[in-house]
Amino acid sequence: MEHTVVERTLAILKPDCVRKHLIGEVVARIEKAGFTVLAMKKVRLSKESAGGFYAVHKGRPFYDGLVEFMSSGPCVPIALEKENAVADYRTLIGATDPKDAAPGTIRKLFADNKGENIVHGSDSPENGLSEINYFFSSKELIEVG
């Protein structure tokens, strides 16, 4: 019997998603996949706040471009909850490079390239919690009971 645990993960609808007017479409797909939205807001990241969020990648070749892109326009962080949220969300969005993403995934359907790939997803349950805390206070997380 497989053990399932309720997890939280952070989704970010990136500036290209917002610019393409896909917020509603992507959120609908997330909800249809069984995720509960605990919190959601539109923000404009400064280069400093984008750099802080992606600090784990500092020094990597794509870091500067990522910070530039993430601060280029508004984005929408979303705190999500579901059993196996991290793995299920990563399956839903598809591979980082849309040309490698499975058919029907969010990136395959909407992303233009590896750099502008519509959405962010946490890569572990631990990072999911710390990433949610980067954008939301505990008062902003609305438990659905």
Image (cartoon, rainbow, N blue to C red):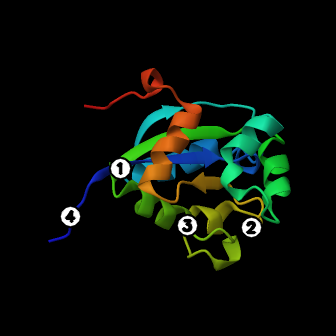
- For label 2, the SS is loop
Residues at discs 4 and 2 in contact (Cβ within 8 Å): no
Cα distance in 3D space between marks 4 and 2: 33 Å
In the displayed structure, 68 sits above or below 137; it is below
Kindly identify which residue carries mark 1.
Answer: 7
Q: Which mark is residue 114?
A: 2
Q: Residue furthest front?
A: 59
The 10 Å Cα crowd at callout 2, few under 14, some 14 to 19, many 20 or more, is: some
Q: Which mark is residue 72?
A: none
In the rendered structure, the answer to whether residue 131 lies left or right of residue 99 reads left
Q: How many marks?
A: 4
Kindly identify which residue carries mark 4.
Answer: 3
Kindly identify which residue carries mark 3.
Answer: 105
Residues at discs 3 and 1 in contact (Cβ within 8 Å): no
| Residue 36 point in image, percent of width and height | 38, 42
| Residue 120 point in image, percent of width and height | 61, 53
In the rendered structure, the answer to whether residue 63 lies left or right of residue 40 reads right
- For label 1, the SS is strand
Tag nearer the camera, 4 or 2: 4
Cα distance in 3D space between marks 3 and 1: 21 Å
Tag nearer the camera, 2 or 1: 1
Which kind of residue does numbered mark 1 sit on?
Answer: Glu
Which kind of residue does numbered mark 2 sit on?
Answer: Lys
- Badge 3 or badge 1: first in the primary sequence: 1
